[in-house]
Amino acid sequence: MIHASLPELRRALDARQISSVELATLFLDRIDALDPQLNAFVTVDCEGALAAARAADERIAAGQAAPLTGIPLAHKDVFCTEGVLTTCGSKMLSNFVSPYDAHVVGLLKAAGAVSLGKTNMDEFAMGSSNESSFYGAVKNPWKLDRVPGGSSGGSAAAVAARLAPIATGTDTGGSVRQPAAFCGITGIKPTYGLVSRYGMIAYASSLDQGGAFGASAEDCALLLSAMAGFDPRDSTSLERPAEDYAAALAAPAGARPLEGLRIGLPREFFAEGMADDVRTAVNAAIEQYRALGATTVEVSLPNARLAIPAYYVIAPAECSSNLSRFDGVRYGHRAAEYGDLADMYGKTRAEGFGAEVKRRILVGTYVLSHGYYDAYYLQAQRLRRLIAQDFQAALQHCDIIAGPTTPTTAWALGQMADDPVQMYLSDIFTLAINLAGLPGLSQPCGLGSDGLPVGLQLIGDYFGESRLLNAAHRFQQITDWHTRRPAIAG
């Protein structure tokens, strides 16, 4: 059962081959055995998981099961969970127990899913390696001396090691897709506004978006179907009809199931900066897509090279504003000794935030300051519009865009600790998608020369999640990269 897909788990639960309590216990025992090596979880909620599993068994017995009823999952520790510690990977919130559920958490509870606990993450979702967490670095299940990617590295590592079959994550500049690539699983970031941000602790509000991790596109489709939906409490939530993303995958596949699909290959993604082993795996995957009936066309994203500077102005600016609420007054960490109110603010924030968070707050405050706002922030927003226009122009000639998720496979723990700019450059292929608000998916497509997974990124037009998931699903029907497991997963 540990390695079963969600449809297989659903059938086993409905046929009473296993109960939800037994399934939850199986994964809780696995977390207890393996997580000390991985550090993927901040909080394991055994009592809450078993209570939810008992309720799920009652629903199943009454014939009222939804697709995720009784299915264990893990939540990234950026989602507020009522009565459970919600830390954002930071000392600042190391004592914060949320009084309410995030919208995503509430939807999945209503669906009958069983939360096993909260996963480790880069502090306040700021990072590309999951090394900035107050709770220590997460290890990549494929090689314990490598990073799992960030900021949702705990969720990705948990799914890759099968500590949970599915998990939630968030993606501000690639934080679902990049760890999915590094850990050899599937991850999807939907269109901005498709998943509510209510109760998702903000980093950069115009970029943050909840996403889904699973072993396969089919598992991600089932999770995303339950996560997406309009929420009046989120002003950026989009009011549109619900979609069953899994149902779109059920159509029988012919010999060439992607006949007529046009895949755009941006020349900028295949120029300099990609490691040879990543290039080899990505090119082989594109050949597989051609065998499935898809055609490829070269497209251009001329402003893609500007995504990193634009992102690292806009995101820190929004983070500077969002994190101003953490002042030691209302909740979270407060300095033990201080002189006056200003001293309390200063000491609390100095003690509560880690180095990467402080770095981004300082950059963000600078670019928003008088005399620099026009020169930096407004200019970055203009670049953002150009980047979005590039994608729309490219998508006039193709249905989806494909390329590498990351320029390399996972690097060694500590390798970029003293060079944050080099780490920022690792997001070169993912940032532009968030700036444009488009959906993106990463799926495993091979192994690098070091035996570590390589991810293929698919990018769609707004609300093109079904098309992305279907393309990935058809690829996974004729390949086995998504079934490859790290040695630790057994």
Image (cartoon, rainbow, N blue to C red):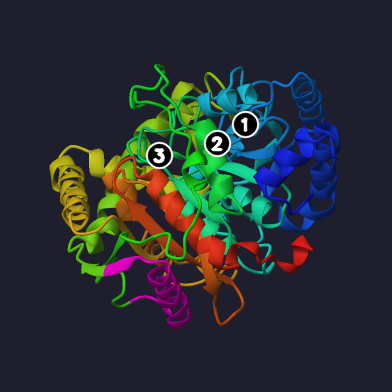
Q: What residue type is labelled 3?
A: Asp
In contact (CB < 8 Å): disc 1 and disc 2: yes
In the picture of the structure, the residue carrying the numbered disc 1 is 86
Q: What residue type is labelled 1?
A: Thr
User: What residue span does the magenta drawing correspond to?
Assistant: 273-296
Residue found at x 35% / y 38% = 192
Q: Relative to the observer, which residue lies in front, 479 or 203?
A: 479
Q: Relative to the observer, which residue lies in front, 50 or 290?
A: 290
Q: What residue type is labelled 2?
A: Val
* Secondary structure, magenta segment, majority class: helix
Residue 19 is situated, as x and y percent measured from the top left of the image, at 84, 34
Which label's residue is closer to the chain start, 2 or 3? 2
Q: Identify the image quadrant of residue 263.
A: bottom left
Residue 349 is situated, as x and y percent measured from the top left of the image, at 50, 35
Residue found at x 39% / y 16% = 232
Alpha-carbon neighbours of circle 1 within 10 Å: few (<14), some, or many (≥20)? many
Tell me, yes or no, whether the highlighted magenta stretch contains residue 474. Answer: no
| Residue 208: image tag | 3
Tell me, yes or no, whether the highlighted magenta stretch contains residue 284. Answer: yes
Mark 3 secondary-structure assignment:
loop
Residue found at x 33% / y 40% = 463
